[in-house]
Image (cartoon, grey):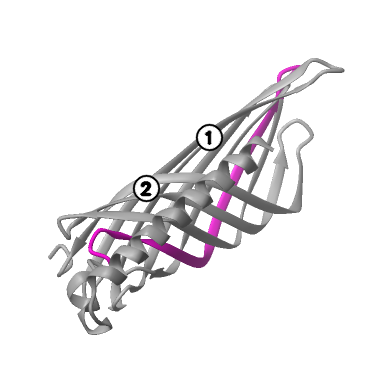
Amino acid sequence: MQKFIAFSKLFVLLCVAFSANLVFSQNTVPSDSLDSVITPFRKGRWLTSLSGSISSSSTELKTTKDKTISNEFGINLSTGKFFKDRWLFGVTFQGDKKEAKGDINTVGESLYIGPQFARYFSNSKDGSLYLNVSPGFVLYRSLATINEIPDFREESEGNGFGTLVSLGYSYVIRDLISFNIGFNLQYAWIGADTFNETGGMTGTENITISNISFTFGFGVILDDFFF
């Protein structure tokens, strides 16, 4: 419930920022023909962004006193070109790592790659609310151990299909540097092979991963790519 309230507050803040930005742009732009002059997200420009996310949570069962602490880290690198004012097409890479410590310890890692389509809604020179959608390919692996059974190790490794949706606000300085804040919704369907070192058994399983995270980062907007 606390996470839902936090996300709701962030969404409201983003909507307020977008509304204020839209009002400002309407008051300062005499016509849509000036859009490509004012917006930093102009046709033909390149945007390269780096962002990260981090979260931590703990769960305790009162009946058994079992406590689990989870930490998750993520990093995203994306680049693309504006094929139209405020419309971007490119590619994105994202890596995630999740650790859970308790009676059962697990470590999971995933690597995501796919094309991205982004829409920046405002033509203000100061920034814009954006929506980014990316379908792509996911590589996944995990390791589970049990404290009471030191020799127990279960590994899973596989791949599948995923989607990544980002909503946030990008604030631009000097038509060059953007600072981004928002949240990501990631969903993935993975087929994985498992191996248990204790029993020497292998098998397959279907894994579904869903994740919502705050993101923060920066980007560089250039008229030409780096070279």
**Left or right of 222: which side holds 70?**
right
Residue under the point 52% across and 61% down:
165
Q: Is residue 189 above or below residue 182?
A: below
Mark sitting on residue 55: 1
Q: Amino acid at mark 2?
A: Ser
Q: Along the line of sight, which residue is nearer the eye, 206 or 66?
A: 66
**Left or right of 143: which side holds 38?**
left
Label 2 neighbour load within 10 Å: few <14, some 14-19, many 20+: some
User: Which residue lies most toward the left here?
Assistant: 227
Quadrant for the N terminus in the image? top right
Q: In this rendering, does residue 75 appear at all?
A: yes
Q: Amino acid at mark 1?
A: Ser
**Left or right of 197: which side holds 182?**
left
Helix, strand or loop: magenta stretch: strand
Residue under the point 82% across and 18% down:
62
Residue under the point 40% across and 70% down:
119
Q: Is residue 192 above or below residue 42?
A: above
Mark sitting on residue 113: none
The Cα atoms of the two marked residues, 2 and 1, are separated by: 14 Å
**Which x, y percent locates residue 225?**
18, 67
Q: Along the line of sight, which residue is nearer the eye, 146 or 177?
A: 177
Q: Which residue is mark 2?
A: 51
Residues drawn in magenta? 124-151
Residue 125 sits inside the magenta stretch:
yes
